[in-house]
Image (cartoon, helix red, strand yellow):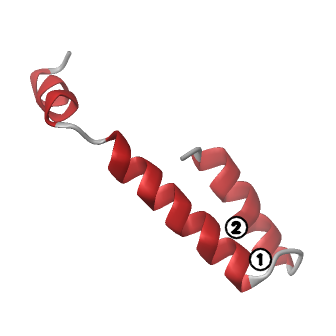
């Protein structure tokens, strides 16, 4: 779930040093991690500016 890691794999994919499947797996993992970190309390705190 770390954006810098995802961007590093994306860069390697663009350079031809990583396979499409590797980038796709990283993208899915990142999306899953971001989704897991969501919670009602966090969304409410964000809305309130806390």
Label 1: state its secondary structure. Answer: helix
In the picture of the structure, the residue carrying the numbered disc 2 is 10
> Which residue was labeled with disc 1?
14
| Contact? badges 1 and 2 (CB < 8 Å) | yes
Classify residue 39 as left or right of residue 36: left
Q: Nearer the viewer, residue 22 or 46?
A: 22
Q: Residue at x 44, y 60 (%)?
A: 31
SS at circle 2: helix
- Residue at image position (77%, 75%) is 13
Comparing 43 with 32, the one in front is 32
Vertical comparison of 41 with 10: above or below: above
- Of residues 49 and 32, the one drawn nearer to the viewer in this rendering: 32
Q: Residue furthest top?
A: 50
Q: In the rendered view, does 50 fall on the left or right side of 1?
A: left
Circle number at residue 48? none
In the rendered image, which quarter is residue 2 located in? top right
Residue at 35% across, 47% down: 36
Q: Position of residue 18 (x, y in %)?
A: 82, 75
In the depicted structure, whether residue 25 falls above or below residue 42: below
Q: In which quadrant is the C terminus drawn?
A: top left
């Amino acid at each position: 779930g770390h954006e810098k890691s995802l961007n590093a794999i994306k860069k390697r994919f663009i350079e031809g040093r990583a396979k499409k499947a590797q980038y796709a797996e990283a993208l899915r993992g990142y999306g899953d991690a971001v989704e897991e970190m969501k919670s009602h309390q966090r969304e409410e705190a964000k809305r309130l500016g806390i």
